[in-house]
Amino acid sequence: MAANRRRWRRVAGWTLLALVALTTVDYWTFPLLAHGPTGHFDRGTNGLWLRYTWYFGQHSPEEERQMARRLEQNRIRYAYFHVRYIKPDGTLRYSFLDKARELNRLVGETAPSVKRIAWIYIDKNSVNVRDEAIRRRLVGEAGRLVSEGGFQGVQWDYEICNDGDPTLLLLLDDSRRLLPSCWIGVAAPAWYPWPLTSVSWSERYFREVAQRSDQIAVMAYDSGLYHPRLYNGLVANQIEVLERATRGTDCRFVVGLPTYGGGTLSHNPHSENMPLALAAVKQGLADTRSERFEGVALFADYTTDTAEWDVFTRDWLSR
């Protein structure tokens, strides 16, 4: 009996060692081998999140024109301009409508194909969006950003929004009712499979949001998945889930990808990077033939350097 136990312990030990070795080798080699299927998947309707400095008017007119030309050159249809956050009373902390109007005028003249979106961050822990009066102020601020600031739509970034949270749905309902002609988007967390479903939205909740929105931008970064193969699979799965969730609605979706190195503990740049993420998006599109997918959205303009724009051109835009 003792000899049998020692033999099984040796087998278990060697098996564990082999698994660790294989996982380690896969960790370093997978990004080198994952290129995704061949073919052209870009639809010319990609997105980019842009820093608040543009809305604050901290760039010269020539810098704004250069930015607009880059958007058009890289087939960016949706420019999400950060207008910072909402105060507890439901109003914008920073209101630069005059500067926003000039920014939108210059971008509109230079790159007319680009849709200019006000990206509005709401911290659910400091803003009681359940309060109807607060929601009305929120929607009023969104309306002013469009009517006075010159934006062509708004993207609600309500964080951290748990699965099934009715508050976001109320905000979207009010947005639709009070701003019936306004383009409305939502920045959403990534979908996770079992056993991590408790930290993500369900497909059912994605569908509830889709029924009230023009676009869902799923933020497929800061995933906490340190292994490249796991992250690759997560990104590819977003296509399948969002395609089903948006089917039969007027909503479309984009997949947000990271272009930054350092960050939080939930971001491992060896796994979460643009080449690997683009390969995963291609695989997801090849598997699903998605009709609701619009493009990828890069996070963000201030972390995307020339080398990364070159990668984007080579791996995504090139035919």
Image (cartoon, rainbow, N blue to C red):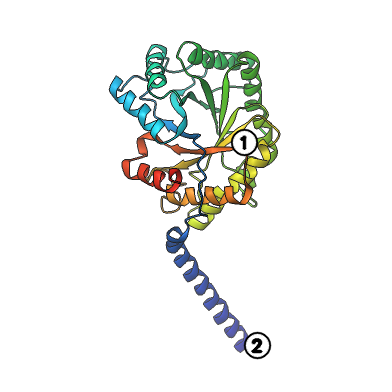
Mark 1 vs 2, N-terminal side: 2
Instruction: State which quarter of the image contains the N terminus.
Output: bottom right
Q: Nearer the viewer, residue 157 or 39?
A: 39
* 5 in relation to 117, above or below: below
Residue 308 in picture, x, y percent from top left: 36, 44
- Seen at 44% across and 18% down, the residue is 93
Q: Which amino acid, mark 1? A: Asn
Q: Which amino acid, mark 2? A: Met
Residue 61 in picture, x, y percent from top left: 30, 20
Residue 1: which disc? Answer: 2
Contact flag, marks 1 and 2 (Cβ < 8 Å): no
- Seen at 42% across and 13% down, the residue is 97
Task: Answer yes or no: is residue 227 visible.
Answer: no
* 234 in relation to 72, above or below: below
Task: Answer yes or no: is residue 17 visible.
Answer: yes
- The secondary element bearing badge 1 is classed as loop
Q: Neighbour class for label 2 at 10 Å: few (<14), some, many (≥20)?
A: few
The image quarter containing residue 137 is: top right
The residue singled out by tag 1 in the image is: 162
Q: Neighbour class for label 1 at 10 Å: few (<14), some, many (≥20)?
A: some
Q: Nearer the viewer, residue 159 or 100?
A: 100
Residue 128 in picture, x, y percent from top left: 58, 22
Residue 151 in picture, x, y percent from top left: 47, 18
